[in-house]
Amino acid sequence: MGIKVALEHRTSYAFDRLVQVHPHEIRLRPAPHTRTPIEAYSLRIAPDDHFINWQQDAFGNFLARVVFPNRTRQLSITVGLIADLKSVNPFDFFIEEWAEHIGFVYPPALAADLEPYLKPVDESEPGSGPGELVRAWVANFTMAPTTRIIDYLVTLNQALCSDVGYAVRLEPGVQSPDTTLAVGIGSCRDTAWLLVSILRQKGLAARFVSGYLVQLTSDIAEIDGPSGPVADFTDLHAWAEVYIPGAGWVGLDPTSGLFAGEGHIPLSATPHPSTSAAITGATDMCESTLDFSNTVTRVHEDPRVTLPYTASAWEAVVALGEEIDARLDAAGVGLTMGGEPTFVSIDDQTSEQWTTAADGEHKRARASDLAARLKAAWAPTGLVQRSQGKWYPGEPLPRWQIGLYWRRDGQPLWSDPELLADPWDGERQWSTPQGADWALLSALASDLGLPDSQVRPAYEDPLSRLVASIRRPAGDPIDTADDPAPYEDSAERRTGLLDRLDEAVTQPTAYVLPLHRGEDGWESADWTLRRGRIVLTDGDSPAGLRLPLDAVSWQPAPQSAEADPLSAPAELGAQRSPAPAVVVPAEGAPVTALVAEIRDGLLYLFLPPLEQVDDFVDLIARVEAAVTCPLVIEGYGPPPDPRIEAMSITPDPGVIEVNVTPTASFAEQSRQLQVLYEEARKARLTTESFDVDGTHTGTGGGNHITLGGRTPATSPLLRRPDLLVSLLTYWQHHPALSYLFSGRFVGTTSQAPRVDEGREEALYELEIAFAEIERLADSEAPWHIDRSLRHLLTDITGNTHRAEFCIDKLYSPDSARGRLGLLELRGFEMPPHFQMAMVQSLLVRALVARFWAQPLSAPLVRHGANLHGRYLLPHFIIHDIAQVAADLRAHDIAFETSWLDPFTEFRFPRIGTAVFDGIEIELRGAIEPWRVLGEEATSGGTARYVDSSIERVQVRVIGADRSRYVVTCNGEPIPLLSTENPDVQVAGVRYRAWQPPSALHPSITVDDPLRFELIDTANALSRGGCTYHVSHPGGRSYDDPPVNAVAAEARRGRRFDATGYTTGRVDLSDLREKQARMSTDAVAPGILDLRRARTVGRR
């Protein structure tokens, strides 16, 4: 999080006369055991003419003894400190095995050391022992002997917090424990002393702690429980500490019921409150007035995903967005931007459905909740349709899809939301009246002017069940009455058998109304089937997907011409077609139909595919007029049409994907994404996830950005093909545009590889394609863009969808759904905050404006090994993206480089910093491209695993003389690169982070820990070092990922130590030999591969 605060605590006494101030003891300096780093401390005392001596009291606390030689009218004590509120996990400690459960006994030697902290708290005079009330409270609080000590302490602390209220008490001193229990209320010091008494009666050593409490307001309001203070706050506070063998002193704050964290800064910890007072001393007899204040001020904040921008910075972002919109409008660009944000569960980040699997019950419930919220926010009179979406190889059925459609002209598409049922609402039980499916289609047929005879029942196929029965093992034979006599086969016998089998099925599964749009209106084909009735194919899909379409007619339906996507659509009619539908022969007619069925107590209506959105609107209006009970609309949605706004929610491995409708302005998109992020959070969905080791990542899904126009004909990419060429060229020139906003999986086999990743000849061919596009710029055939680039904008397998620049929907000659004038930028991961998403969008929007005004025509750059070398290190990515921002400013677009700081801090978190001899060594996370391995046999078939066992960190050295100092990692010299700043050197270190059974070089062990040292070659000595632990240094093995960003930061921070170096003389000859070998062996300049250093480098 990186928040540093300045705390000021002032206490002043004004006397009514000159008095002698006797010696004072001041305990207002953070104690040695504080876990919050204190970067600066000040103690100012007035009057100035005094003497001060610092010491440590009998319990190790800092104590200032101050003597005042002269009389004075005032006494003022002001404490100032700067604290780095790095997240601290209060539960990150080891416990001795024999002390893991309650009831343990301290060993005699340890008990002797802890004797002052085990002494019972006296209720009144010395030796009186605990009072009756506190003894009763202790007796009533019991837990099973097998209870873990940590669970016991948590429960006890919360129980006491619940039983005793909090109040500010200005009287001096501390109440006795019985008094606090009797009144049921107390100050923080009263409750802390009560907790000390309780713990000691339980046989646990405990001490009283006074200190500062710093609480900062939350960046975002909590959806579960209180959000904390409304403003930053600090004050003197008190709590207790209990001694747990192995863990040491552990802080418990009974005022809040929480354990002590980074906001608890101890000043004094003693067996009794009387020896822990902040200020003790005396003056001559006088009248005095006390004045005090406590303030806390934030002095430094790293950009973070919960608050990426200050108010002023965000105002500047919005202003630039409006300015760019005005520029685009003036130039007639007609740009629209859409996207595909993804979300994960707040409550479940470990189950398969939220990690690897595409579907799950919880995922369906969250998606359904989100759809309802978005409908209320965006389309109160829109239509929610639940249908089947994409069908991916290896999956038995297409994935589900929740579509939300509404009319752009503001007219209602569906008026009564109460008639749209949610099949995944777990709190509601549906009960549809029997026959509602037939009644709905009968009413629709009547409305269309069709006879009821066109509504046909559809039955399950008994033949498929019979075949399944025949294939069962012996011992459970089929009934004799159903025996088909397979050895006496003939056409007549087969027909008779089918008749007998069909007669046995009397309950229809669904009802079918054949329906399609003819030239003059609605038409219904007269289906005549060989079996005399509609028999569904076997399966679990909706009945509308199991119709026997190949049994309706020998003659296929005529192919209809697709609508020209470049033609201007007419105004969407609001009135239904008045002409009645007609019944037509089935031969040669389209085999499409409405299908109604009752499934799981709910009425479902399956819509047929329609080619014109006007027909879809007409049909939906008829359905709403005919239905009398809640139903679920499924089947085919409306065809793409600019008069209908559409968005969808679909499942993807580990995430929920939301395909938002394109927007035409920055302000419109900002409102859209802000609502989406807020409603998703209310639906208990989030935009961030965490690895077990505390690594903070996005959802793992994408946030693909789509560029286009209101209609395909107005798409700027089709009207000006040079815009696409300029964007492609610029992205290729600046790798930061590919890697700063991407997910963790980058490279040749990722979801969005760059055009120059994995195929060296692609740039050669791409330059030819660019020249050809320029030659054909005046052509009226828009598909030449697709033909020129389709086979170059792919991954290494030829998949056109898995490319950083995807043109599948630009203008493919194959189908109308591929001719939408859209470019999809797939190299963007889901940003955690909507403002970060908008800055991404602003950057793309700014580049479109820049290249619309001045197209870019330049040779492509051969990055070579640097592409996966220096350009995967944060320093060079930051420098590269800064050049992009500078280029925009040079073209009068005031894009600030600092607006991208939240992305760099999120993408490349600072691991730690250490300073030796004025030389700073900083470690940051870097990008490591993961390989896809070869095929391997699994229980489900063959699979190709991703090797994610290799990671990379950046080492940045500031202020080191290259001729004198060398930085090593685990004894290997790091090949530091010079930068644009002569004082800064940068390199990357690749290392094995874990050792899976299937990986490249699986026999190479883990590089843990990574020890970085600063070697002074002039003296052959190590001047200091720092250590990065790949796993928890204490050997703790977490089972679950951290619950939030604060817990994740604590886990990350625990793995870095600014200590650790090699003692004695350094073998410089060995060091120089390693440097010489590395200079000829390095594949990418500036990258140390510890795997190679441990193998090839030692041959």
Image (tube, rainbow, N blue to C red):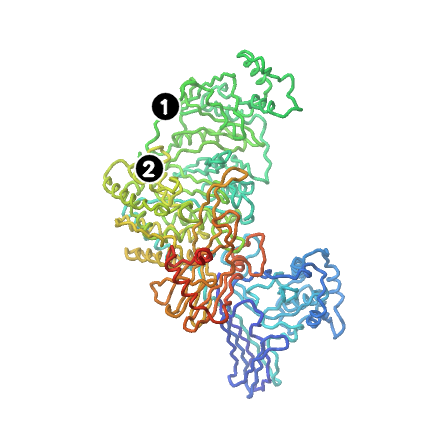
> Residue at image x 67%, y 73%?
272
In the rendered view, would you say 400 is above or below 65? above
Left or right? Give the position of 1072 relative to 30.
left
Q: Looking at the image, which residue sits at the far front?
A: 1099
In the rendered view, would you say 213 is above or below 388? below
Three-letter code, disc 1: Glu
Which of 473/881 is in front? 473
In the rendered view, would you say 522 is above or below 646? above
Mark 1 lies on a secondary structure that is loop
Left or right? Give the position of 506 relative to 852.
right
Tell me if mark 1 has few (under 14), some (14-19) or many (20+) residues whose alpha carbon lies within 10 angstroms of its own. few
Three-letter code, disc 2: Tyr
Q: Report the residue marked by disc 1.
A: 519
> Residue at image x 75%, y 61%?
139
Between the C-alphas of marks 1 and 2, the distance is 28 Å
Mark 1 vs mark 2: which is more N-terminal? 1
Q: Report the residue marked by disc 2.
A: 811
Corner quadrant of residue 406: top left
Q: Quadrant of the C terminus?
A: bottom left
Residue 254: image x %, image y %? 64, 63
Residue 854: image x %, image y %? 25, 50
> Residue at image x 47%, y 49%?
1000
Is any part of residue 308 visible from this angle? no
Tell me if mark 2 has few (under 14), some (14-19) or many (20+) residues whose alpha carbon lies within 10 angstroms of its own. many
Which of 1064/907 is in front? 1064
Mark 2 lies on a secondary structure that is loop
Residue 110: image x %, image y %? 69, 69
